[in-house]
Image (spheres, rainbow, N blue to C red):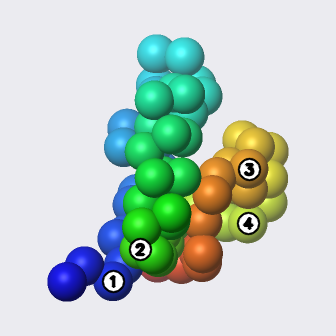
Amino acid sequence: MIRAVFFDIDGTLLSHSTNSVPEKTMRALHALREQGIKVIICTGRHAMEMEELGMFILPADGYILLN
């Protein structure tokens, strides 16, 4: 049973060509959470960078920053 998934931001959730999170990706993250799977964002970015990029709109259960 999958209980949690961990995602990087750059090139995984954030498209470098559009500099945004594709709608298809947002739907997939919502679907995971609806199934009771925790979504954790794991990135080397600082919280201020995440805010500037608008990444806190992601449907996430937690964040691991500056890793």
Q: Is residue 14 above or below residue 56?
A: above
Q: Distance between the residues labelled 1 and 2?
A: 5 Å
Which is closer to the viewer, label 1 or label 4?
A: 1
* Quadrant location, the N terminus: bottom left
Residue 55 locus on image (x, y percent): 68, 49
Q: Which residue is drawn at 33% across and 83% down?
A: 3
Q: Which residue is drawn at 50% across and 65% down?
A: 33
Marks 4 & 3, CB-CB < 8 Å contact: no
- The tag earlier along the polypeptide, 4 or 3, is 4
Q: Can residue 56 be seen in this view?
A: yes
Q: Mark 3 points at which residue?
A: 57
**Number of residues whose C-alpha sits closer than 10 Å to that of mark 1, classed few (under 14), some (14–19) or many (20 or more):** few
Q: Residue at 42% of width from left, 60% of height from top?
A: 32
Q: How far apart are marks 2 and 3 (CA)?
A: 18 Å
Residue type at mark 4?
Ala
N-term-proximal mark, 2 vs 3: 2
Could you tell which of marks 1 and 2 lies nearer the N-terminus? 1
| Mark 2 lies on residue | 37
- Residue 10 visible: no
Q: Are marks 1 and 2 in contact (CB under 8 Å)?
A: yes
Tag shown at residue 3: 1
Three-letter residue code for mark 3:
Ile
Question: What is the number of the mark on residue 47?
Answer: 4
Whether residue 13 is situated above or below residue 40 in the rendered picture: above
Question: In the rendered image of this protein, does residue 4 appear above or below residue 34?
Answer: below
Q: Is 16 placed above or below 53 here?
A: above
Instruction: Judge left or right: residue 2 versus residue 64.
Output: left
Structural distance between the alpha carbons of marks 2 and 4: 23 Å
